[in-house]
Image: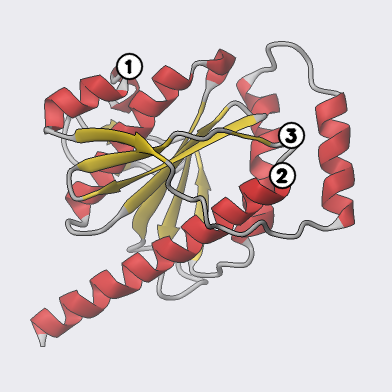
Amino acid sequence: MAFSDFKTIFDVANSYQTKLTKNVLFGDVLPMELSKEFMEDLSYCLDMKKPNPSAIALSENLISPIIRYVGRHHRNLLIWSREYDLKVDDKLCGTPDYLFSYTEQPDTVSNTMPLVCVSEAKVDNFTLAWGQTLAEMVACQKLYPTMVIYGFASNGEMWQFAKLEDNVFHQDKNSYNIATQPNQIAGLLNYIFAQAVLEAQKFLKHHNNMSA
């Protein structure tokens, strides 16, 4: 069994005793300014978007650009695209579409902490994307108990966000459209990345104090 074998969030919840909630999570998060060059590239990609784009086109044209744009402001977060082997056991294992991990040394890729999980909603299947994302989030939390783990799912145009705190999956009931709300999406990504870094630093500080 792997992350992709979880078809819905209910599959994950039933397997790992996770409570599911849906409400407004990030209503107070401020938009983030995006450069003129970025907005021009985004407009071009949206204009050129084909029906039922491939996973590669979806990633390269609409998902990767904005997460790279925002991610560069968080030097302690590493972006992994289909290359991070996340494994807890034979059930919680696989390679997330995207994963963000924390490192104390920005130039170091070893011993990083996975904190933010991302799945592409291929053919607009958000149900499947969230099943996979939540399974990945549970895996991260099992590796680092007490930490809040963040996740989001996107088909390129629509973006949805959530967090896993203790055993409660909080899903934002709002969806965001990159064509009309790019600054809001960037602001949400910026907020989530900043919170993930704080979670990692808090966890490491507590762990170091316990070891002292």
Judging depth in this view, the residue of 204 and 17 nearest the camera is 17
Query: Could you tell me how far apart the alpha carbons at marks 3 and 2 are, in whole angstroms?
Result: 14 Å
Residue 61: image tag = 3
Considering every residue shown, the one lying at the far bottom of the view is 212
> Which amino acid is tagged 2?
Pro
Which quadrant would residue 151 be assigned to in this image? top left
Q: Residues within 10 Å of mark 3 (few under 14, many from 20)?
A: some
Instruction: Provide the residue designation for mark 1.
Output: 7
Is there CB contact under 8 Å for labels 3 and 2?
no
Tell me if I can see residue 94 in this picture.
no
Q: Quadrant of the N terminus?
A: top left
- Image check: 14 left or right of 109? left
Q: Residue at 33% x, 66% y: name it.
A: 199
Instruction: Provide the residue designation for mark 2.
Output: 182
- Image check: 159 left or right of 146? right
- Of labels 2 and 1, the one closer to you: 2
Nearest to N terminus: mark 1 or mark 3:
1
- Above/below status of 202 relative to 115: below
The x, y position of residue 23, in whole percent, is: 38, 38
The x, y position of residue 204, in whole percent, is: 26, 74
Nearest to N terminus: mark 2 or mark 1:
1
Query: Could you tell me how far apart the alpha carbons at marks 1 and 3 are, in whole angstroms?
Result: 26 Å
Q: How many marks?
A: 3
Judging depth in this view, the residue of 43 and 30 nearest the camera is 30
Is there CB contact under 8 Å for labels 2 and 1?
no
> Which amino acid is tagged 3?
Asn
> Which amino acid is tagged 1?
Lys
Q: Secondary structure at mark 3?
A: helix
Query: Could you tell me how far apart the alpha carbons at marks 2 and 1 are, in whole angstroms?
Result: 29 Å
Q: Secondary structure at mark 2?
A: helix
- Above/below status of 205 relative to 167: below
- Of labels 1 and 3, the one closer to you: 1
